[in-house]
Every structure is written in C-alpha cells, then in structure tokens.
Amino acid sequence: MRAFLGQVKQKLTTYAFRHGTRLVDLEWYRSKTPIHGFLRRFPLLHYYLFGSRSTAQCYPLFDIEYFATQCKQANLPIPQKVLKTYLKNKNYWRINPHPLFDADFYIGQMREAINQSPLMHYINGGHLHHDPHPLFQHTWYFISFPGLKKLTQHCPLLHYIKIGFRNNPSTHPLFHADFYAKNTGIPLADQKTTVNALMHFVTSTNPSLSCHPLFDLNFYHEQKDHHQQHVQPAYLTIKQYLLQPDCWAYSTHLLFDATFYSSQPSGKKTEKSPLEEYISHNFHIRNPHPLFNTRWYQGRKKNILQFTGQGRVPLVHFVLNGYRMGESPSPLFALQWYRNTYMQGRVDDTNPLIEFITQGEAVGNRPNPLYPTNWQEWLLKKYNSTTLAEYAQKNPIRAQNFHNRISDAFSTPYINNNNNEAKSYLILFTPRSGSSWLTDIITQQKILGRPTEWFNPDLIQSAMNGLSRKTYNIHEYCQELQNTHKSPEGYFGAELTASHLSLLTDLVDIQSTFNNPAYILLLRKNIIAQGISLHLATTTGYFHATNTINQDNLAEYSEVKIKKWVNEIIKDEKYFHQFIKRKEIDFLMLWHEDIKANTQNTISAVSNHITNGLLSTTYEPESAHAKIGSSINKQFEERFRDENKAFIDNIDKQRANLFGTETSLNTQTHQIS
C-alpha cells in the first residue's frame, strides 16, 4: 500500500508541476537539498515552503546556478522564481537550463515554432525525435543502453545524468568516453565512474582537451587557424566543427583526410560532418586515408565488426590499440618491420605510420622491406607521385580476398619483372589431401625440383632468407624463387592452397609470372574422412607422421567442427573450380587415395604432365610420410555418416557439379568448360 501511495503521489506531483509553473523531481530534490525533521517524509511540502528560492536544485535538467550565469551573459535579469519565469517567459527560452541542454541547438531542429519552453518540450516527448545537445545523440546513446529504446517514456538525457553516466558510455560518435576518461584521469573501476565525463568536457575551459582519438585539436587548428593561438574551450571547437559546414573541409587527424574521404563515392551520404558520417555510417566501407585500407585492416582483424560503438571503427582501433599490436594499416606499409628497422623496436605512444608520414618519409625511410632504397625515385618516375600517400591515392589497392595473412609488403606492382626461363608447375591442393606426401615423392625425382608452399605467409620470410639475392617486391620474389629453386633441368614447383592462391592472384598475373605453368589439382575423394582428419589434426596438433611431438594428444568427437571443416574444404574446391574455369587452363587431376595405391603411376603421370613427356622419372619413390589415421578416424567417420546422411548427400551433389566423382587415377588432362 505504501508503494502504491508513493507512486500516486509522484504522478500527481509530476502532473501538477508540469502543467503549473515548475519542474520538480522529488527524488532529485531530496538528494540535492538538506531536509531535516519530519519534512524528509514530505519533500513536496518542503519545496513549496523553501524550495522556490533561487538556489534549489529540483530537477536534473535544470541547474539553477548555471541558468543564472547564462542569464548574466545574456544581459537578462536573474528572476526570483527561476523556474516559473523560465517556463512562462519566452525571453528566457534561449537560455540554457543545463550544460547538457543547448537551447539554440534544440530549437534549431524544429520545423515549426514551439509554444512551450525547449526543456518542457523535450521532456514531454521531444526526446523521441530530437537531441538536446550537439554531443548527446540519443540513437548513439542507445548503443550502450539498448533496452532504453523501447521505454519511450524515459528521457535519454535524464537517464544519463541520473544513472547512465556511471557506466561511462559514449554519447555521440565524436565523444569517446573511455578515451576522454583516460586522457583526463577520470577514475574508472570496472568501467564504472562517479564523474560525468560529458559534463566534465563541456564545462572545461581547456582549449586542447580532445574528446575523441580522431579529433586532434592541434592538427585541426593548424589547418583552420594557420598556427594562430587558439584559446576557446575545446568543446566550442568541436561544436563549431559539428554545426558549421565551412569547417568540414579541414581534417581532424593526420590519418583522417577529409578531402580524400569525401571524394569516395561508396557508402552513405549525409548532411553531417565527414568525421561523424565516417564513424556513424561508413567506417567499414570507405578509407579514411590513402594509407589506411579499411578492407585490408578488417580482413586482418576479422572480429572487429562484432564489437559495438567506437570499438568497431577500424581507424579508431588502429589509433588506440592496433599500432601497438603491430597491425599494419595497409599492404603498402609494414608497420612491425618499420618499427624494428627505424624505431629500435620500441612500443610506445609513437604510431609508426604517423612517424613515417611526418618524419621518416622525408629522410627516405622505406615503408616496407621489399621496397628498394630508391623507392621514391621509382614512384616519381613511373607514377609521378612524390609521396607514398599520393601513390596510394592514384593507384588504390583492389585486394578483394585478404582472408589470410600474407607478407605486409606484397603490394608493390610498380617495379618491372624480368623474364626468367624456369618451367614452372603449380600444385593446387586442399588440406589433408596428401600434399606433403606428393611433394616428397616429386622431390625424390630431382628433375622436377622441390615444390613447397613458397607463398604461405608463415614461410615467406624464411624463403626470402634462402634466396641468392635480396628481392624488393613480389615480382622479384617470384622471379628469384624460380631462379634459385629450379632443378638443373629448369623445373620449378610451388604448392598453393585456395587462400594462398587468392592472395597471390590479387598481386600478380599468375600466367605471365610463372611462364604459363602446368597445373596439378590434388583433392581427396573421401571428403568426410578429410574433414575428420582436419578436425583431429587441428585439435591435437599432430599433422604428419614425420613429426611425432603431438601424436599422443587426444581429441573428442565434434559434429559441428567436422561439418565446419568439410564446408571449408568445399569452399576451397569451389574457388579452384572458378579459378581454372576463368583461366581456361588444362590441369592434371589427382586424388589423395591414388598416391599410396598407385604411387609409381602417380609420379609418372605428374612427370608426363609437367614435362610434356620429354623427361621420365628414374627413381622408385619411397616417402617417409605415412597415413596417420587410426581407429579413431574410422569410428568418427562411421558415426558421422550414420548421423548426417542429408548433409553428406548435399556435399556429394555440390562436388559432382565441380570435378565429377572419379575414383581412379586419370592421367589425362582436364579442362572445365
């Protein structure tokens, strides 16, 4: 009964004062006003008797002392009954009642004139469609409190001032609360605080206090004010930028080029400032700077789009954390290598990309290890570009498939490739299809060279160290690989998974780089056994019989993981199918099951295909590789086949549309039409 009467009292009070002369929040009034004796039980009566004085704090969004200060600045008399005068006298409607309620900004959003004070209009329903302050955007605030979106009777700003600020949420795309708290020393304990960060910023007089990692006030003023001293509070600078389109031509950060960003046609066009538009809508589509490739960065940080708010913006992540983690912003700039080469490997507050742009490039520092020392001469001579950023802007990188890591420097197409005389062949394979076994028996023949995963990102640096001379770009790397590792008879081989092939085709023309190579496609007929083998190998770490370190590790049956690996294999096979069809190339089809059953026939077919029958094999192949499957593999396969017949039928249908269902060795070449 007491709770019910309390609710009735609150509702009656709210109604009476909203439709009378005052705004009153009894809970707020009691927390801000010392009330003694029996009147603590009757805050409404206390307010009637004493609260109408000019210093009473009776509503979270009406700060009487702040309002009085605003009146003085506007040359208006401070009324004795402040609330009553504010609500009734239109001359006071342009006075801000609170630091976080900007009356002019709020009224500016109206299509029609309002017939009540802006604050009353806001709390009576205006909060559903309008924002009270340039740095308080209700839709952005809902990211931190999604449940509030459905509670339309609750005013977002009121929620923030009373309780929301304790979680230190970001209230606007250009107000990064965590960044601001860290820079100003606002204490955070388990992401909780007792300081209202937005209020702290808005009321600060510091002219260089930034509220967002992508708004460098000094950098901004250098462009706008031409190095003149700026003394206005930082908040006013941010406000001017947000509300005055004339300011939008200026970049807010060295890595956010406003002109470059706005020149891109993709994404959503809005009437907001470029930085706000980028953070709110286009962070995953447009590049904020010629040397920051959004798709590249998202490909390397695959989970970044799963974050919420500011954390999912690639450039924000890079500026705050990515550069410390060694993440490269673009395939043109090898950040970790640059840090180790020119910055003594130190990890501090200096962002290597910013160091390169502001200092390193001017003294000739190379942006990645595969650029020659005279790389700037090459840029100027071949592309009429004086800086790396200018080159990147004129020649945007169109890398579509950065699904896997590859050398940061595999991006320089401007140094010419010299001709070579190697006769190359490429083995396209899926994981656990017997590629190591096939490589071993081919290597034993000697005449065909030693095919290896030369383009596996984990092996590239080691391969570069083994070359007879330094290489400065992907073309020279490919050429020197063939020169160094071709057999005396002139044959060079490489193994490529689907992901490595997709990366390589984004960077070079395969046919010309490898002199129209011969192709071998190695697959496994029993794709279910292949998926189980992948599951066991990745779970236990035991991949090959030649490495027994993890052979005793155990793995549990997992239908989900087996399906995942089977689907990954199908995805790779489809990519190979599309690549071969697009290139219209002949290829030799090999099945994993034939390598052991018909090893001699297999190597003969491979030799004939690569050499066009000019050379024959002379060595009986003997490989140290052996099948590592055990009874566990068989048990898992039997169980999976019994429980997933529909899944297997679907997989079989997909494969039949790709390469057919041949089960025996076919020494004839194939072509997909």
Image (spheres, rainbow, N blue to C red):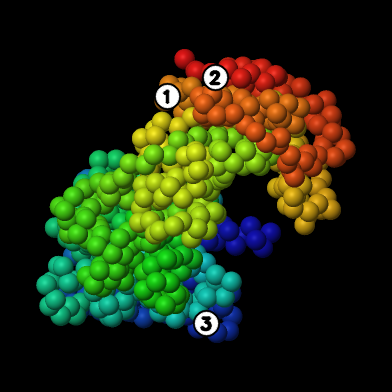
Q: Nearer the viewer, residue 141 or 362?
A: 362
User: For mark 1, what is the residue?
Assistant: 582
Residue beneath the point at 17% across and 78% down: 230
Please tell me which residue is depicted at 51% across the width and 35% down the height of the picture: 426
In front: 109, or 655?
655
Residue 244, given in percent of the width and then of the height, sits at: 17, 58
The relative height of residue 371 versus residue 269 in the rendered view (above or below) is below
Q: Give me the disc on residue 35.
A: 3
Q: Quadrant of the N terminus?
A: bottom right
Task: Please name the amino acid that badge 3 sits on.
Answer: Ile
Q: Residue at x 42, y 55 (%)?
A: 408
- Alpha carbons under labels 2 and 1: distance apart: 17 Å
Residue 262: percent from the left, percent from the top?
A: 22, 49
Calculate the distance from the C-alpha at mark 2 to the C-alpha at mark 3: 94 Å
Q: Nearer the viewer, residue 91 or 198?
A: 198
Q: Amino acid at mark 2?
A: Thr
Q: Earlier in the sequence, mark 2 or mark 1?
A: 1
How many residues crowd mark 2 within 10 Å: few (<14), some (14–19), many (20+)?
some
Q: Quadrant of residue 514?
A: top left
Of the pair 657 and 650, the residue shown nearer to us: 657
